[in-house]
Amino acid sequence: MELKVPYFNLRTHETEATFGTLVEILLKSRLRMPVETDHEFYDEDVNAYLAGILLEYIDPMYHASTRPYVADRDLDVFLEATRETDTYWTYWIYKINADDRLIDLGIFQRQRARSEAVLTQAKTYYGFAADYNQRMHGRATAISDIMDKLARWPERYLLILQQARREYLHFVSTVTDDELRLLHRDLEGEAQGLPLKQKQDELLDAYSTWQRTSNPETRARLLQVLAELQAMDPGFCPAGFPKPTPP
């Protein structure tokens, strides 16, 4: 997922950069706790990593790509991690399972009843991820350093995520009914306008192709898309487009 995904602030009705917003949320959460960035050791990199993981959790494609490989039992995670001989594969399996545990406990809190066991899993998997990342590169890397910090002090970062959830990431409980209705209306408007926007993009592509080739096939395709767009938006009458040939 690109780090430019926009975040819409329901309070200010302004669009902001999602990644930057998440980093700011984590920093503010730290300031409300006795856990300051770089106070005991350098960990600005962990701030950025956690913000990146939260950003990925917004992306349905991330869930589709990782969900088949996230397992509840240690044995199943181990079997998946060792199914391939590729060191990167092993690192990635341990990393996504560790992320899943930490984000679940910190943000979604679906496994609060067994939080101690789940956090122990996260700690172990981050440790394995750090080790395999170093093996890949033959040395310590920025990522292996982050994995190592998360393995050594998972409680520290779990508290930060939980604070972020309480203060900033509890969407439904902080939004009024009127704001939710307004959001729903706006989303419906966006959904209704999406087919028109897609058809407009299709017309621009067809027009560009026709301008380059000027052959009968691309002209016919352009006129077809133009007719489809005008059926959706009767008031659309662009200049510079070819006119249909009279029968």
Image (cartoon, rainbow, N blue to C red):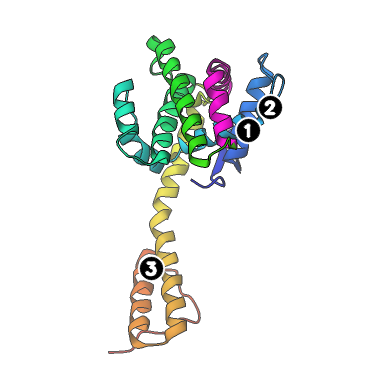
Between the C-alphas of marks 2 and 1, the distance is 8 Å
Checking the image for residue 229, the label placed there is 3
Question: Is the magenta region chiefly helix, strand or loop?
Answer: helix
Question: What amino acid is at disc 3?
Answer: Leu
Mark 1 is surrounded, within 10 Å at the Cα level, by few (under 14), some (14 to 19) or many (20 or more) other residues, namely: some
Please give the range of residues in magenta.
Answer: 142-168
Closer-to-camera residue (92/172): 92
Residue 32 image offset from top left, x and y in percent: 67, 17
Residue drawn 56% across and 35% down?
Answer: 143
Which residue, given by chain and number where applicable, does mark 1 sit on? 45
Q: Name the image quarter holding residue 52.
A: top right
**Which quarter of the rendering shows the C terminus?**
bottom left
Between the C-alphas of marks 3 and 2, the distance is 56 Å
Element type at mark 2: loop
Between the C-alphas of marks 3 and 1, the distance is 48 Å
Mark 2 is surrounded, within 10 Å at the Cα level, by few (under 14), some (14 to 19) or many (20 or more) other residues, namely: few
Element type at mark 1: helix
Decide which of tag 3 and tag 2 comes sooner along the chain: 2
> Contact, CB < 8 Å: mark 2 with mark 1?
yes
Closer-to-camera residue (20/96): 96
Residue drawn 39% across and 35% down?
Answer: 90
